[in-house]
Image (cartoon, rainbow, N blue to C red):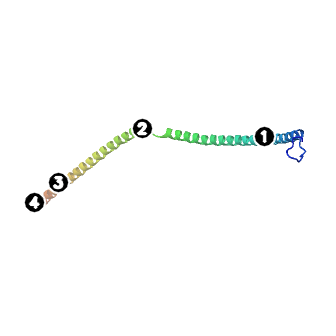
């Protein structure tokens, strides 16, 4: 009996078992090498895809940042054209002074026109009195002349 159990001879010997196991190990090693190569290829492909995705994301982020920077520059330019509070306060004070001057002139003109109107009324009254006196004197003179005739 050469290592077999029982009464049936199987044909296995230590050498045949060794060859069988060696082939199994070699087949497994080849399978593992194949899987390692395919895994490495898949990893390389995935890494390349990830690098491309990162590059695209970086490009998109740069474009967004450029847009934000352009917007910020526009706001800065726009803010430079705004009037400051001190400038507005100065302009408002100057306008208030001008309005006060114009109001004083209007008041003065109204006073002058009121005075002129009163003077005109007074002049008319004087003219009316002078005319009535003149007409009365004329009437008296005419009456005297008529009486003498």
Q: Which badge, 3 or 1, is on the more N-terminal residue?
A: 1
Q: CA distance from mark 1 to mark 2?
A: 76 Å
The residue wearing badge 3 is: 130
Q: Nearer the viewer, mark 1 or mark 4?
A: 1
Q: Residue furthest top?
A: 86
Q: CA distance from mark 1 to mark 4?
A: 156 Å
Q: CA distance from mark 3 to mark 4?
A: 21 Å
Q: Which badge, 1 or 4, is on the more N-terminal residue?
A: 1
Q: Nearer the viewer, mark 3 or mark 1?
A: 1
- As drawn, the label of residue 36 is 1
Q: Position of residue 83 (x, y in %)?
A: 45, 40
Name the element at disc 4: helix
Q: CA distance from mark 3 to mark 1?
A: 136 Å
**In the displayed structure, does residue 75 sit left or right of residue 62?**
left
Q: CA distance from mark 3 to mark 2?
A: 63 Å
Q: Which badge, 1 or 2, is on the more N-terminal residue?
A: 1
- As drawn, the label of residue 144 is 4
Whether residues under marks 4 and 2 lie with C-beta atoms below 8 angstroms apart, the answer is: no
Q: Which badge, 3 or 2, is on the more N-terminal residue?
A: 2
Q: Nearer the viewer, mark 4 or mark 2?
A: 2
Whether residues under marks 3 and 4 lie with C-beta atoms below 8 angstroms apart, the answer is: no
Q: CA distance from mark 4 to mark 2?
A: 84 Å
Q: Residues within 10 Å of mark 4 (few under 14, many from 20)?
A: few
Name the element at disc 2: helix
Name the element at disc 3: helix
The residue wearing badge 2 is: 87
| Count of numbered circles on the image | 4
Whether residues under marks 3 and 2 lie with C-beta atoms below 8 angstroms apart, the answer is: no
User: Which one is nearer the viewer's eye here, 74 or 130?
Assistant: 74
Name the element at disc 1: helix
């Amino acid at each position: 009996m050469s290592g077999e159990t029982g009464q049936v001879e199987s044909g296995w010997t230590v050498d045949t078992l060794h060859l069988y196991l060696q082939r199994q190990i070699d087949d497994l090693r080849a399978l593992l090498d194949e899987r390692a190569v395919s895994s490495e290829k898949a990893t390389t492909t995935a890494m390349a895809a990830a690098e491309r995705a990162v590059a695209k994301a970086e490009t998109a982020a740069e474009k967004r940042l450029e847009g934000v920077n352009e917007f910020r520059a526009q706001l800065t330019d726009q803010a430079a054209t705004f009037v400051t509070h001190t400038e507005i306060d100065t302009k408002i004070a100057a306008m208030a002074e001008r309005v006060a001057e114009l109001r004083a002139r209007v008041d003065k003109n109204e006073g002058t026109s009121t005075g002129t109107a009163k003077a005109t009324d007074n002049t008319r009254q004087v003219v009316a009195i002078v005319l009535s006196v003149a007409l009365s004197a004329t009437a008296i003179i005419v009456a005297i002349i008529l009486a003498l005739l």
